[in-house]
Amino acid sequence: MIAVVMGLCAYCVLAERKVSAWIQGRMGPNRTSIPFISAIPIIGPFLRKLGIWQPIADGLKFLFKEDPVPGHVNKFYYFLAPVLVFVPALLTMTVVPFGSYWDSNGNMHPLVLANLDIGILFIFAISSLGVYGIVLAGWAANSKYPLFGAIRSGAQLISYELAMGLSVLPVIMWASVPGHFTSGLSLVNIAESQDIVWNIFWQPISAFIFMVALFAETNRLPFDMPESETELVGGFHTEYGSFKFALFFLSEYAHMIVGSAIFSILFLGGWDFLPVFSDPWPKSILGSVCSVVWFLLKICICLFFFIWVRWTLPRYRYDQVMKLGWYVLLPLAIINLLFYTLLIPVFDNIWL
């Protein structure tokens, strides 16, 4: 899991550069190469033009750059902060199911490290811990711009986690319908409860609120107020460089990947092929591989959407970010919850 997520993080950076270049009519990275591979006719120049070696060069740069430590920082918390941001980003992947396999008796089992009955609560609890590392980074820097970014991050998390939690409640209620599934907090059950219709069609407002809140939770444009280069230089990580900056960088992309996986499970049926249609995968190892690849494809589509929005929409003002969270998304999430609280019992009777 760590190898796959870290690999996706590395090539998300390449996708970010290539998609932004495509949107802006540029080439993107097309020079980095490995000598003995670039010497191969046709294949070498083609891979170099794709920029496929660029993430390797970036990773080596982060590892071997000089790592200066400013003299005015609180060193213990300065070193601790990147770890506190990075660890929760990886820890949430333990409860994310990513496919299915069949045993010798033809029974289906989910591919997941820890199939918790309260998986969605575990993810909300652990992912919210990352903001402590951001606040600690801003405070330990003993500088005003990082402190501003840290305070913004804390306020943004509080503002959008409420709407995000309320948007998931209708999904949990539907997965908990008697006769359907018993534990609506299990991510496996939530994915399997969409065998007739995906939640993005059945609960589009919930999907919209969750996706907007996910942008805010991952500090992505147009909600990257904790960094906001035009106002705060680099925000909470202004005083960081080299490998410690790389941990912040990787944690953001890890949050995006895990967030995209959760969105796919909650609203796109997880590894399910298409709504209404039964899974076409054979009940074998090949079928397991197909389910995992299909799930990864959904994650990649969500990641493309993240990148597309970043290079399309301008950054909001900070007061607009707060107003959107408290005056728009939160009331909309409450109304949406009340609506499905009344509607789901009707479907419950039809289902039974």
Image (cartoon, rainbow, N blue to C red):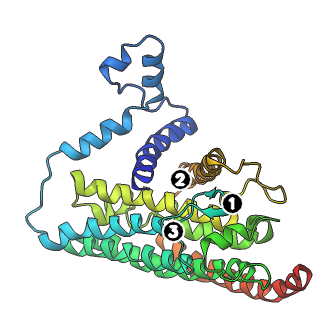
Q: Nearer the viewer, residue 93 or 24?
A: 93
Q: Nearer the viewer, residue 174 or 234?
A: 174
Decide which of tag 2 and tag 3 comes sooner along the chain: 3
Left or right of 82? Residue 173 is right
Secondary element at image label 1: loop
Residue 87 location, x and y as percent? 34, 67
User: Looking at the image, which residue is at 35% across and 25% down?
Assistant: 33
Along the horizontal axis of the image, is 128 left or right of 349?
A: left
- The residue shown at (20%, 73%) is 140
Residue found at the far front of this picture: 105
Distance (Cα) linking label 2 and label 3: 12 Å
Res 328 seen here: no
- Foreground residue among 351 and 309: 351
Amino acid found under the numbered disc labelled 1: Asn
> Which numbered disc flags the more N-terminal residue, 1 or 2?
1
Q: Quadrant of the N terminus?
A: bottom left
| Quadrant in the picture for the C terminus | bottom right
x, y percent for residue 220: 48, 60
Asked which quadrant contains residue 225, the reply is bottom left
Check residue 310 in the rendering and tell me which mark sits there, or answer none.
2
Disc 3 crowd rating (10 Å Cα; few below 14, some 14-19, many 20+) is many
Q: Is residue 326 above or below residue 200?
A: below
In the rendered image, which residue does mark 1 sit on? Answer: 105
Q: Earlier in the sequence, mark 1 or mark 3?
A: 1
Q: Residue at x 50, y 57 (%)?
A: 257
Give the spatial CA distance, label 1 vs label 3: 45 Å
For residue 125, above or below residue 299: below
Look at the picture and state if 29 lies above or below 208. above
Which residue type does callout 2 highlight? Arg
